[in-house]
Amino acid sequence: MSSSPPISTTHPIVVKIGGSTLGAHDTTLEDLATLQRQGTVAVVVHGGGATISQWLKVHDLPSTFVRGLRVTDAAGLEVVTAVLAGVVNKTLVAGLLALGGRAVGLSGVDGGTVEGRAQDAALGYVGEATRIQLGAITALLDAGFMPVLSTVGYNPSATCAPRLLNFNADTVAGEIARAIGASRLIFLTDVPGVLDQEKRLMPHLSAETAAALIEDGTAAGGMIPKLEACLTARSRGTESWIIDGRAPHSLLAAVTGSPNGTRIW
């Protein structure tokens, strides 16, 4: 496996957690707290699709997807906001605090961190990011806190409430990494990494190969926005990793050791 450059002491890492790796049943939060104590500066971006689906079911609302994106109507947006910016975000922050970490939760709305427009009328309140403002994030980093960002964002062009949008967390992670000049972008997933057509792990991808996997259909579903986010981050020189967050201390290995997964560079 290709060696990785050391983590920069001046540029943070961006860690995206979601799906089955939200920290409830693995070592992700433990690793984040350990890294913080060791001096690694991190920004966390999280999803929460499974929890959203559970809460939509509780409220007898449908979970409908178009091209892998959740259709979000006005009623669904209320659930998405409550779950992502509330239940999931605060559960993660509380877990980090319990482990001795210094963390603050925020959403893309706070400080106008993630601004955008409605992506497609068929998707409802699903956003396409048009602007990243780092003021809130950098203020927290400067104060020694780990920002934990949920991806409900702000729609400045909306003429009435709700002025909120539901953004894809993978995409936002890539945009945050590019905006902040991250030294590394790490996706914690529930798969070993990027797989080829024979389902074999691809330990290293060039930007050209990653784009080709999307084009020829080898990368599908949720892997597409992850690879696109890696390509976004690469435009600022950021190295990316897609790793199996279910493996014990996989995040720690991705930062301080030799991780298992796929490196995109």
Image: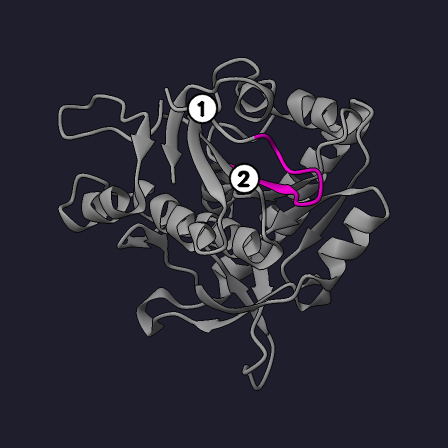
Q: Residues within 10 Å of mark 2 (few under 14, many from 20)?
A: many
Expressed as whole percent of the image width and height from the top left, the position of residue 128 reads 44, 66
Q: Secondary structure at mark 2?
A: strand
Residue 59 within the magenta-colored segment of the rendering: no
The crowding category of the residue bearing disc 1, from other C-alpha atoms within 10 Å (few below 14, some 14 to 19, many at least 20), is few
User: Which quarter of the figure has residue 95?
Assistant: top right
| Between 245 and 186, the one nearer to me in the picture | 186
Quarter of the image for the N terminus: give it: top left
Where does label 2 land, which residue? Answer: 184
Relative to residue 21, is residue 86 drawn left or right? right
Specify the quadrant that holds the C terminus: top left
Q: Which mark is residue 222?
A: none
Residue 235 point in image, percent of width and height = 44, 56
* 14 part of magenta stretch: yes
| Mark 1 and mark 2: Cα distance apart in space | 14 Å
Which residue has dot 1 on it?
A: 3
Question: Can you say whether 209 is above or below 246 in the image?
Answer: below
Residue at x 82% of width, y 50% of height: 142
Q: Amino acid at mark 1?
A: Ser
- Judge depth for marks 1 and 2 and give the one in front: 1
Tell me which colouring the rendered structure shows. one colour
Q: Which residues are magenta?
A: 6-17
